[in-house]
Amino acid sequence: MSMPHAPSVLLVDDARDMLELLRRSVNAMGLTPFTADNAVDAIGILEQGPVDVVITDLNMPGVSGIQLVRYLGEHHPRIPVLVITGYPKLEDAVQVMKLGAVEYLVKPFTQEELRQAVERVLRAIGAMPSAAPPPATVRDGFHGLLGRSRAMQEVYRVIERTSNNKATVLVTGESGTGKEMVARAIHYNSASAAAPFIAVNCGAIPDQLLESELFGHMKGAFTGATTSRAGFFQAADGGTLFLDEIGNASPAVQAKLLRAIQDKEITMLGATRPQRVDVRLISAANNDLPAMIRQGGFREDLYYRLNLIHIHLPPLRDRTEDLPRLVDHFNHRFSRELGKPPLRITPPVLETFAAYPWPGNVRELEHLVHRLVILLDGTVATSDLPMHMRSPAPRAAVPDTLVSLAAMERQHIRAVLEAVAQNKTKAAAILGIDRKTLRGKLKDPG
């Protein structure tokens, strides 16, 4: 017997480096990983949706792995459990086996030993046939996302696995890769598709207003609060709240987000009592959150709460095989909107597209095709493309002199601004930064 989707594995370990290692190993096996760094969160995940296998450490603070195995045996007896531990005790092994664990691994173990143990568990429940499975169907797209590349097939697979639960999702990738489209695909592929989908750009709302916008405020909570007003959490109740550029959230907002995830309740500014909310939280970041954690700019505990399921969108330059499909889609879409025949994109143009690095990713490609459809009729030649696409980017101003990274950055910003006729909004989108950051760089005397 084979399952219609890749089996899901819940990983539980209080050591976050081990948890990340397990996540990567399980993901490499073609399985869908869910992660929790304590038993209480693991039980919460089990209550949100079906899980095929649980892999848990035994020695954890608070509720132990043995207690978790006992809970699984009483409430989810059909879910097999693989136990791992760094402090092997014969009595513990006997106890967890009596409680229902089917496999027992002692740290340190090799990736091969882990793979074999997981496969034995999956075969025991009929989730992994002994023979090689038939090749998966390659999709052209999924809920508005487009691409046949291997990276996009993995994105579609993980989105599909999230449809029956409300686990938090963190979507990462450069600006313009389509992170909000992934969030919408998750929402509209779920049982809550008819409920609200609210998208919030945390980088576009001033720090002093973001807390009020997210959680709402009571009348008189601050100067100018003449009436009570609900926030985005209340507006998204029953559905999905998408927080883009989550790295811009202030420490105060981060603390309230952590409580909202843990307790499933929020407190409006100026209110004395919290209120329950049922919201699927999806976050996105184009900056390096682990680096921000190391620098003290982002809470580590919030990061792991948001990163229960991780989806990474590759940059367009790493999936150039998807370019023809994307170009064709945008060409027909914008031509239809303007009531004109689609343009003919010549092979040399597609070759130029494939060689270009696309710093603005799919969004930059969309804007370019839209402009071509507006300005041209018939055939598109390479001479119709912007100069910066037809000509290789210039090297250092003085070829024989090494320049600083800051100087190279200034040179690139100047080139992008020139290419978009000094339009700062378009330049910021292509560069993967917000207008505020771009303004700061333009004020730099360099």
Image (cartoon, grey):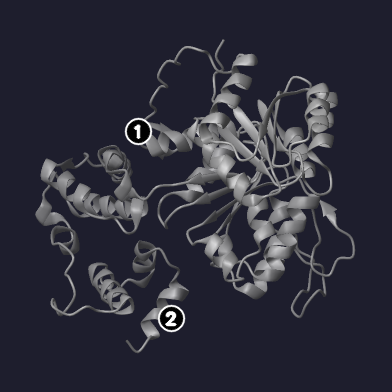
- Asked if residue 199 can be seen in this view, the reply is yes
C-alpha gap between disc 1 and disc 2 = 39 Å
Q: Position of residue 148 (x, y in %)?
A: 35, 33
Q: Quadrant of the N terminus?
A: top right
* Front-lying residue, 390 or 19: 19
Secondary structure at numbered mark 2: helix
Q: Residues within 10 Å of mark 2 (few under 14, many from 20)?
A: few
**Is 222 rendered above or below residue 260?**
below
Q: Quadrant of the C terminus?
A: bottom left
Q: Earlier in the sequence, mark 1 or mark 2?
A: 1
Judging by the rendered image, the residue that carries numbered circle 2 is 440
Identified at 18% across, 59% down, the residue is 389
Q: Position of residue 378 (x, y in %)?
A: 13, 43
Using residue 88 as the reference point, say whether residue 146 is left or right of it: left
- Asked if residue 307 can be seen in this view, the reply is no
Q: Residues within 10 Å of mark 1 (few under 14, many from 20)?
A: some
In this view, the residue farthest toward the top is 1
Identified at 52% across, 41% down, the residue is 24
Identified at 26% across, 50% down, the residue is 369
Q: Which mark is residue 220?
A: none
Using residue 306 as the reference point, say whether residue 178 is left or right of it: left
In this view, the residue farthest toward the bottom is 445
Residue contact at pointers 1 and 2, CB within 8 angstroms: no
Judging by the rendered image, the residue that carries numbered circle 1 is 148
**Is 11 rendered above or below residue 409?**
above
**Which quadrant of the structure image shows residue 54?**
top right
* Front-lying residue, 240 or 16: 16
